[in-house]
Amino acid sequence: MDEAEELIQLGVRALVSQMSAAPGIELHMTRCCVLGLTDEPLADFNRLILGPDPDAEGFLVRSAARAKERGRPLTAVMGRQVAETLAPVARRLGFTAVGAAPLMVLRPDVSVQPSRPANIVRALGPELVGVAGDLVAAAFDEPRDVIARCIDVCVTPTAGVETYIAWDDDRPVGAVTVTPTGDTAGISLMATPPEHQRKGFGRALLTQVIHDYRRRGVERFHLGATEAGRRLYASIGFELVADLPVWILGQSVSARG
């Protein structure tokens, strides 16, 4: 198994942890694939990951059928080899290729030190979870009520999903979610609202969190980057492992009215 395949497997576990408390959640998974459907009519909150599973084609077909039955749009991320094999099947099912998600990794031998002192607090309890949700909604321009239903509810002390907030004096300026699995941790929902971007807050938050987790025994970190965030992650020491093809099934409905 190559590193990309291993990280896709870890991504499957992380997605289950991150979606497990969402209303109407429906989860189907194997070791290398996962389908997560919610009650939301937004593709960002209905997700499919397809890794190197012997029945990846069957999983894809069943996932598309189930999403259509529930009337949900679906965002699918596929391993490169899976996508090469199943692209004709995906198109036949109605999926549209929309780009790629950079899969990046920070290896144990890459030194990372906090870029500057930062006040970092873990989001525990309704008030701080709400603050983190506000930051995520603002950073990704998502409806706040959807974030509350699909993300806030999953941030609990025992869910395996740990969210941290960076503060500038008394203002929350960024948030990040970490899903640790043994000596490896997934980074997701790196959220810096537009008014706080390009001021070093995101770098300060991420480098401090990585430093703290390394003191706890986590050696390697992985994430699925956006093109906007790719330069930041590369400057910290993350390396590109693979550009994973991204596909969309159906049409995402606006929840903003």
Image (cartoon, rainbow, N blue to C red):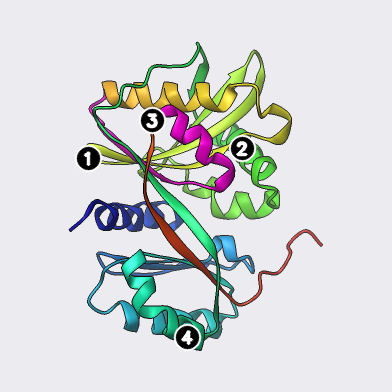
Observer-side mark, 1 or 3, equals 3
Q: For mark 3, does the 10 Å Cα neighbourhood hold few (<14), some (14 to 19), or many (20 or more) residues?
A: some
Ranked by sequence position, the earlier of labels 4 and 2 is: 4
Type of amino acid under label 2 = Gly
Q: Nearer the viewer, residue 1 or 67?
A: 1
- Residue that numbered label 1 is attached to: 182
Q: Is residue 91 visible?
A: yes
| Residue 178 position by quadrant | top left
Distance Cα–Cα, label 1 vs label 2: 28 Å
Type of amino acid under label 3 = Gly
- Residue that numbered label 3 is attached to: 237
Type of amino acid under label 1 = Gly
Distance Cα–Cα, label 1 vs label 3: 21 Å
Q: Position of residue 201 (x, y in %)?
A: 59, 23
- Residue that numbered label 4 is attached to: 65
Ranked by sequence position, the earlier of labels 1 and 3 is: 1
Observer-side mark, 3 or 4, equals 3
Label 4 secondary element: helix
